[in-house]
Image: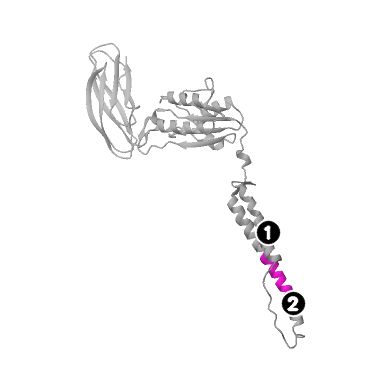
């Protein structure tokens, strides 16, 4: 048993107070004279016995009440042996995938996650801290001092790579097989599978969600053409699939550029949580490669606003 306020245990000496009250009962007995007490002798003995038992029970009650009150203020707790960590290593995974570029009222999600990571590092100054990101594998993961951790955090920017929790645990296991603390800071997209986290009993995993209240986003999903062979002076029809992941109908503009020249631009409207296919026609006036791209205007998640393609 452990106590948050062990110094209050000295108050247990107060248990002597009820004992002193019991031993030194200062009540004065008033003597009443009777003409004859021969009928009261048996009653006196019986009442004295009952009174002694009653006083002892009152004393015990007072002792227990005082002891429990003192222990309550001491705030006792027991250590969880299952979560007891003997390792001096702490791992911090900072999700720097493109979805962390989203912006809420407090700023970019990646910047919010960086501040959390710095707070974690400051609370573990006497331990080895390892920074994990989507660009780091077990070949380039090293322990960092507090100053090095701050410098490394400031260098982190969003990237197209991503990792699920199984990959994070594999990197951690390649560095340390002991029971360690792992802090995971992420917006936890659907691709971030948590099944391995649920089944993991080797580590103490702390999930810190960096939530984005604004989930509206339009993305360029995919594109294709129906013609297997392209020849000069032919018309090519390009099909573009656009998806709306928000909870409201969104209007945006789609631009098509061919070889860095604007070919067409149109306004499209997509209902909430729906995908829609649009058709674009271009005329091929050359036999060289066609470098093109579709661009939409969507904010604040912008990494999926451009889709490049090449037609040979």
- Quadrant housing residue 84: top right
Marks 2 and 1, how far apart at CA: 29 Å
- Quadrant housing residue 99: top left
Q: Which mark is residue 70?
A: none
Q: Are marks 2 and 1 in contact (CB under 8 Å)?
A: no
Report if residue 82 lies within the magenta region. no
Q: Could you say whether the residue bearing mark 1 is in a helix, strand or loop?
A: helix
Report if residue 53 lies within the magenta region. yes
Give the colour scheme of this rendering: one colour
The residue tagged 2 is 46
Magenta range: 46-59
* Above/below status of 70 relative to 187: below
Q: Could you say whether the residue bearing mark 2 is in a helix, strand or loop?
A: helix
Residue at horizontal 54%, vertical 38%?
198
- Quadrant housing residue 203: top right
* Along the line of sight, the residue nearer the viewer: 188 or 147: 147
């Amino acid at each position: 048993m452990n106590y948050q306020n062990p110094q209050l245990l000295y108050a247990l000496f107060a248990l002597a107070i009820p004992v002193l009250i019991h031993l030194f009962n200062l009540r004065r007995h008033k003597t009443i004279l009777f003409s004859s007490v021969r009928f009261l002798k048996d009653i006196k003995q019986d009442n004295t016995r009952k009174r002694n038992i009653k006083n002892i029970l009152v004393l015990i009650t007072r002792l227990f009440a005082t002891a429990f009150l003192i222990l309550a203020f001491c705030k006792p707790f027991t250590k969880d042996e299952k979560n007891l960590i003997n390792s001096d290593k702490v791992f911090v995974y900072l999700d720097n995938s493109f979805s962390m570029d989203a912006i809420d009222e407090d700023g970019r999600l990646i910047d919010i996650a960086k501040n959390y990571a710095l707070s974690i590092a400051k609370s573990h100054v006497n331990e080895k801290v390892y920074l994990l990101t989507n660009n780091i594998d077990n070949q380039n993961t090293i322990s960092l001092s507090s100053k090095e951790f701050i410098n490394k955090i400031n260098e982190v920017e969003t990237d197209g790579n991503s990792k699920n929790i199984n990959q994070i645990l594999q990197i951690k296991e390649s560095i340390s097989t002991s029971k360690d603390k792992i802090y995971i800071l992420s917006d936890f997209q659907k691709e971030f599978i948590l099944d391995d986290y649920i089944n993991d009993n080797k580590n103490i995993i702390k999930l810190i969600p960096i939530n984005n209240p604004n989930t509206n986003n339009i993305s360029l999903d995919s594109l294709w053409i129906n013609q297997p062979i392209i020849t000069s002076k032919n018309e090519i029809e390009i099909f573009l699939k656009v998806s709306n992941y928000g909870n409201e109908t969104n209007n945006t503009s789609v631009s098509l550029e061919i070889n860095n020249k604007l070919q067409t631009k149109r306004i499209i409207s997509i209902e909430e949580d729906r995908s829609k296919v649009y058709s674009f026609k271009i005329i091929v006036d050359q036999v060289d490669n066609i470098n093109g791209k579709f661009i939409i205007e969507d904010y604040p998640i912008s990494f999926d606003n451009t889709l490049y393609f090449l037609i040979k």
